[in-house]
Every structure is written in structure tokens, then in C-alpha cells.
Image (cartoon, grey):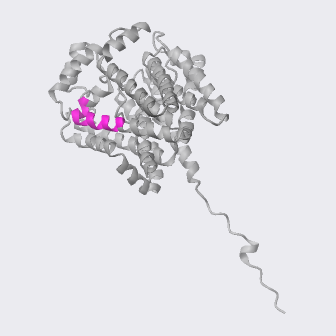
């Protein structure tokens, strides 16, 4: 009788195939991309080494965006269907990004506009990836991890390398960032994430939220960033507003919304006197460190090209007539208008500002509705991010900023809310 022949695979089983754990790659890739867009560590290292961030240093920082581009394109290529859906459901934002690219045709700094418009497109593709691959709560865990790491590292740098971690002249802590205000912005994001973690239904996250709040408040106080302190206060007020909204129904909720709308209108119409009053109370410069004279001149330049502006981020290019006029008049070189809405008008005119406001107002309305329908899904912190970014850009300029974590999170919130709002209606 013939003996059965043993199977080769039974004696020598095939080696297990190499399996890419794509979900793990998405978490790690998104974390790396967020850190590289945070403005932490690497710009400071280059500035300390060379004394400033010049053209050569900026070129090296742009090279460091290559991993972000690779991560974004590789991971997003697996979800083209969801990408197309996000494009359709975020039409105002998509039109705004396209307008920035088209502004090359009328820009006063064609090369600058082209390069930065491409970088803006990559940033918004990364925002789309975050919006379609993470839930609000997962995004909270991701962002809080990156921001918490940066804030604790900043506090550690204050102890270990105080000469590098503090502003020249002892004006405040900058941590692992290039300026105390940038640390203040990061600390404000830390406050937003910390409160959201503290309020999360999973008790395991409460302690994590508490630690993040400790680091955020410490960085705020040590930096002395007026913008960071004010925007963190705005975040606390917004959390209170959404908590009140969740407890009201019918006419009471409508009255609350009307009151808030009136308050927002009063702040917008009387924004300058109110900001001066607040900063006086904080012991800050009543001219907002020269911002008010800057805004007067910028408003005159906006009136010259009101509809389409000067081209995306081209106005502040050294050597252009408008930039040189502002610099000569003020006797100092502003990097931007210190107001995101004015910079949008300078870049893309009234058309660009209309698309921007359409995107933000639409997201605020849809986000509030999502929070009311599904409060345990974590929508509240994205709503607060949008509100705080609007407040922050009254005195700073992060709107439509390429390779910037503030704009990255704002556009992620807008896209994510637009995607899920339509699903909820369906």
C-alpha cells in the first residue's frame, strides 16, 4: 500500500505575508503631520542656530513638509470616493481654495502665490483626510496628544534650557516655539481639548484632560500671551453656551440663540473699543502693540483692490508697493495684517471673504445642530474650535494659512461637520 505523501505546505508552511496595518499608519501618520504643522521645535532650532528665520531657513522648513505631503497623498489615495464626497459637501471651502489658486493670474507676487497656494491645497487635503478617517472623539484624542506633548515639552524647556525657551529680554516663555504668542495659541488649543476630555463620558479621559489643562494654563501664564488668554476665555464661554443650549428647548433655545447673535454683532461692530478695554484690563498696550495704526493703513490698501485683492498672500512680499508703503509709514515691518479677515481681503478681496464667511457660518449652524442631535459624539469641541479661531483672527492672522495647525484644525472641523451633517439629514 502506498503511503500518503505529506503536503509540502504542512511541513513547510508559507511565511506570513507582510500586512500593512493601515489604521495604525493613519494614526501615526496623522500625528506626525500634525506635529510638523504645529510650528513647534524645528523653527526654534533653526532660529537659535542662525539668529533668525531667513529665506534659507524657510526653505529648509519647506523641505520638512515633504513627509506631510507623502503621508497625505498615500493615505488619501485609498479613499478617493470619500474625498469626492467631502468635496461636494464642502463646496464653499473648495471654491475658496480654488480662488486662492486662480489668484496667481492677478497676483502682484506670482511666484509666492503659486508656491503658497500649492501648500494651502496640501494642508486642506490633510484636513480632508482627518475629516473622513477620524470621528470627532478620535480627532480629539489625536490632537490632544500632539498638543499636550508640545506644551509639556515647552514647560520642560523652561527648566532645562531657559535661555532658548524664553523670549529675548525676558518678555515671556516661548517654549519650543519661536514666539510667546505661538505658545499662547497652542495653549489655547490645549484648553479646548482639555475641557472636552474632562467632559467626556469615559471617566478614563478625565485625568488626561486635567493634566492637559494644567500644562495649558501653565503655558498661558508663563507666556503672558494676551491673545492666548483672551481666546482661552472665549473657549470657556463657548463651552458654557453649548451646555446651556443643550438644556433648553423650543422658544427658550431660540431666545438664547438670538441673544448670542446680538452679542456677536455688538462685538463685531464695536470690536476695536472692546479689545482696547479688555487689553487695558490685562495691562497690555492699548494700541494692540501697533495693530490699530496698521489696520488703518491696511484698510486703505484694501480699498484700492476691493473685489479680488492682490493675490493669495502676495501683499506682504518684500519689494511690493503696498508692503513698502506700509513699512515706510509705520517704520516697522509687519509680517501680516494681524487680522485674518483683513488679510483675506488683501489676498482674495470681497469674493474671498464672502466664501470664507459662508464656510464658517454654515459650519457653525450645522455643527450646533449635530451637537444637539448627538451630544455624546463629541461635536462640541469642534464647534468651539471654529468660534475660537474666529475670535483669534480679530488680532492675529491664521485664516487660510498654509502649513499651520490652526487653519488645519479649522478646515478639518468645517469639512467634518459638512460631511456628517448631510448624513444626519439623510
The answer to whether residue 64 is seen in the rendering is no
Q: In which quarter of the image is residue 273?
A: top left
Please say if 26 is above or below 242.
below
Horizontal side of 168 relative to 105 (left or right) equals: right
Say which of 249 and 365 sits in front.
Answer: 249
Give the farthest residue toward the right.
Answer: 1
Give the farthest residue toward the left.
Answer: 304
Say which of 270 and 132 sits in front.
Answer: 270
Horizontal side of 354 relative to 375 (left or right) equals: left
Please say if 173 is above or below 117.
above
Residue 298 on image: x %, y %: 23, 21
**What residue is drawn where x is 21% and y is 14%?**
329
* Numbered marks: total: 0
**What residue is drawn where x is 82% and y is 91%?**
2
- Locate the N terminus by quadrant: bottom right
**What residue is drawn where x is 68% and y is 69%?**
14
Q: In which quarter of the image is residue 290?
A: top left
Residue 130 on image: x %, y %: 47, 44
- Secondary structure, magenta segment, majority class: helix
**What residue is drawn where x is 63% and y is 26%?**
211
Residue 121 on image: x %, y %: 35, 43
Residue 182 on image: x %, y %: 45, 23
Q: Judge whether residue 351 is colored magenta.
A: yes
Say which of 211 and 336 sits in front.
Answer: 211
Where does the magenta region start and end? 345-361
Say which of 130 and 122 sits in front.
Answer: 130
The answer to whether residue 355 is seen in the rendering is yes
Amino acid at each position: 500500500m502506498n503511503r500518503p505523501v505529506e503536503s509540502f505546505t504542512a511541513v513547510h508552511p508559507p511565511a506570513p505575508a507582510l500586512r500593512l496595518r493601515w489604521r495604525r499608519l493613519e494614526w501615526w501618520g496623522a500625528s506626525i503631520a500634525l506635529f510638523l504643522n504645529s510650528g513647534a521645535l524645528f523653527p526654534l532650532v533653526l532660529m537659535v542656530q542662525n539668529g533668525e528665520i531667513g529665506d534659507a531657513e524657510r526653505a529648509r522648513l519647506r523641505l520638512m513638509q515633504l513627509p506631510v505631503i507623502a503621508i497625505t497623498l498615500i493615505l488619501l489615495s485609498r479613499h478617493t470616493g470619500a474625498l469626492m464626497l467631502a468635496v461636494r459637501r464642502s463646496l464653499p471651502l473648495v471654491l475658496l481654495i480654488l480662488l486662492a489658486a486662480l489668484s496667481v493670474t492677478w497676483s502682484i507676487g506670482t511666484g509666492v502665490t503659486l508656491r503658497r497656494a500649492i501648500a494651502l491645497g496640501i494642508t486642506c487635503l490633510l484636513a480632508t483626510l482627518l475629516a473622513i478617517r477620524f470621528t470627532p472623539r478620535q480627532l480629539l484624542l489625536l490632537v490632544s496628544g500632539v498638543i499636550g506633548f508640545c506644551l509639556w515639552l515647552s514647560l520642560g524647556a523652561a527648566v532645562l534650557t531657559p535661555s532658548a525657551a524664553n523670549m529675548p529680554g525676558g518678555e515671556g516663555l516661548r517654549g519650543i516655539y519661536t514666539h510667546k504668542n505661538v505658545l499662547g495659541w497652542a495653549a489655547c488649543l490645549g484648553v479646548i481639548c482639555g475641557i472636552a476630555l474632562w467632559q467626556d463620558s469615559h471617566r478614563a479621559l478625565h485625568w488626561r484632560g486635567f493634566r492637559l489643562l494644567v500644562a495649558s494654563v501653565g503655558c498661558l501664564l508663563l507666556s503672558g500671551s494676551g491673545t492666548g488668554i483672551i481666546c482661552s476665555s472665549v473657549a470657556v464661554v463657548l463651552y458654557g453656551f453649548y451646555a446651556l443650549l443643550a438644556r433648553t428647548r423650543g422658544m427658550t433655545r431660540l431666545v438664547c440663540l438670538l441673544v448670542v447673535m446680538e452679542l456677536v454683532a455688538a462685538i463685531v461692530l464695536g470690536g476695536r473699543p472692546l479689545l482696547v478695554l479688555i487689553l487695558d484690563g490685562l495691562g497690555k498696550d492699548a494700541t494692540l502693540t501697533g495693530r490699530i495704526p496698521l489696520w488703518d493703513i491696511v484698510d486703505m490698501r484694501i480699498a484700492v483692490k476691493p473685489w479680488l485683492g492682490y493675490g493669495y498672500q502676495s501683499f506682504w512680499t518684500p519689494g511690493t508697493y503696498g508692503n513698502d508703503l506700509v513699512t515706510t509709514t509705520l517704520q516697522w515691518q509687519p509680517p501680516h495684517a494681524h487680522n485674518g479677515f483683513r488679510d483675506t481681503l488683501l489676498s482674495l478681496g470681497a469674493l474671498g471673504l464672502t466664501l470664507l464667511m459662508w464656510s464658517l457660518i454654515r459650519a457653525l449652524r450645522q455643527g450646533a445642530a449635530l451637537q444637539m442631535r448627538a451630544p455624546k459624539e463629541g461635536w462640541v469641541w469642534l464647534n468651539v474650535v471654529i468660534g475660537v479661531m474666529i475670535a483669534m483672527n480679530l488680532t492675529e492672522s491664521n485664516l487660510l494659512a498654509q502649513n499651520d495647525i490652526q487653519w488645519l484644525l479649522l478646515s478639518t472641523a468645517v469639512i467634518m461637520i459638512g460631511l456628517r451633517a448631510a448624513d444626519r439629514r439623510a
